[in-house]
Image (cartoon, rainbow, N blue to C red):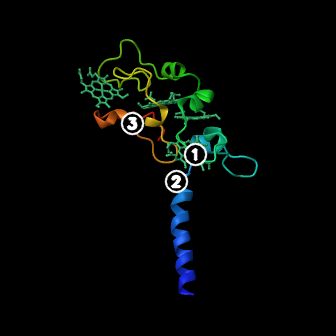
């Protein structure tokens, strides 16, 4: 009996983080939930059984090219130092940073630049 209980407890402990870990962002949740009420992982992970970090091309298939995305967040040419820089077209990396360095899907998003800077980016949905 004790062994069965222990086994059940172990299963619960293991399944809770697993379920939480695959939470989606609010902004993706609805459109990526199928008629059966389940999230359709294939929108980002394709049909692969073993899920890996999606390539930028996956994000770009819906959001447009990285240049299009950079255009959305372009700063005015006369923006001064108090305007935070365009995260999608930066001084050091240009448009080369993978989307998933900042937009984390299953956890809170973070700004890669903030390993060294302290940008706030209030517009970013985390
Ligand atoms: C199947 C299409 C699809 C795919 C694939 C997809 N998205 Fe989205 N995404 C959407 C839609 C639709 C919205 C909600 C409308 C909007 O804000 O553009 C959204 C919203 C977002 C937003 C919030 C935009 C805002 O308004 O602030 C971000 C950030 C985002 N997606 C990033 C990503 C990243 C990064 C990936 C790749 C890992 C990705 N998306 C893959 C369709 C997609
Ligand atoms: C260096 C971090 C970083 C990377 C890399 C990054 N983003 Fe973003 N993204 C942000 C931040 C910060 C914002 C908030 C926008 C702002 O401050 O203007 C944002 C906003 C967005 C938005 C909403 C734009 C809007 O104003 O409607 C979309 C869509 C988006 N990102 C998609 C992507 C996609 C797709 C990629 C990869 C091609 C990507 N991002 C790469 C940091 C990043
Ligand atoms: C909107 C796109 C999107 C959808 C839909 C999505 N994922 Fe993810 N997934 C990501 C991104 C981006 C990462 C990279 C880590 C992160 O951002 O959390 C990831 C990482 C993972 C990883 C870890 C891969 C690794 O090598 O680190 C697993 C496992 C995973 N996802 C499983 C799932 C499952 C299961 C589903 C369906 C319930 C799902 N994902 C749906 C975007 C998505
Ligand atoms: C590994 C650390 C590191 C990362 C990550 C990093 N930066 Fe920097 N950045 C620096 C350093 C150091 C300087 C100062 C160098 C100089 O001024 O010549 C700098 C300078 C800058 C400047 C010029 C500052 C000014 O006042 O003129 C901008 C703009 C900038 N970074 C944007 C970004 C953006 C956007 C990102 C993320 C996409 C980013 N950085 C990521 C280290 C980093």
Percent position of residue 52, x then y = 54, 42
Percent position of residue 102, x then y = 44, 36
Name the quadrant of the N terminus: bottom right
User: How many other residues sit within 10 Å of disc 1, few (<14), some (14-19) or many (≥20)?
Assistant: few
Q: CA distance from mark 3 to mark 1?
A: 23 Å
- Identify the image quadrant of residue 75: top left
Q: Is mark 2 within 8 Å of ligand 3?
A: yes
Q: Secondary structure at mark 1?
A: loop
Q: Is mark 1 within 8 Å of ligand 3?
A: yes
For discs 3 and 1, the disc positioned in front in the rendered view: 1
Residue 111: which numbered mark, if any?
A: 3
Q: Is residue 79 left or right of residue 1?
A: left
User: How many other residues sit within 10 Å of disc 3, few (<14), some (14-19) or many (≥20)?
Assistant: some
User: How many other residues sit within 10 Å of disc 2, few (<14), some (14-19) or many (≥20)?
Assistant: few
Nearer to me, 58 or 83: 58
Count of all numbered marks drawn on residues in the image? 3
Residue 21: which numbered mark, if any?
A: 2
Q: Secondary structure at mark 2?
A: helix
Q: Is mark 3 within 8 Å of ligand 2?
A: yes
Nearer to me, 6 or 91: 6
Q: CA distance from mark 3 to mark 2?
A: 20 Å
Q: Residue furthest right?
A: 35
Q: Quadrant of ligand 1?
A: top right
* Residue identified by numbered label 1: 51
**Does the rendering let one see residue 104?**
yes
Percent position of residue 86, x then y = 41, 23
Q: Residue furthest bottom?
A: 1
Q: Secondary structure at mark 3?
A: loop
- Identify the image quadrant of residue 92: top left
């Amino acid at each position: 009996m004790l062994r069965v209980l222990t086994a059940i407890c172990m299963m619960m402990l293991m399944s809770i983080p697993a379920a939480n870990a695959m939470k989606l962002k609010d902004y993706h949740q609805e459109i990526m939930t199928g008629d059966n009420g389940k999230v359709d992982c294939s929108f980002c992970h394709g049909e692969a059984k073993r899920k890996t970090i999606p390539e930028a091309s996956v994000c770009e298939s819906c959001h447009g090219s990285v240049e299009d995305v950079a255009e959305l967040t372009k700063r005015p040419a006369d923006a001064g130092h108090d305007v935070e820089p365009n995260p999608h077209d930066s001084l050091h990396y240009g448009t080369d940073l993978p989307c998933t360095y900042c937009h984390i899907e299953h956890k809170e998003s973070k700004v890669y630049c903030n390993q060294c800077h302290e940008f706030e980016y209030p517009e970013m949905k985390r």
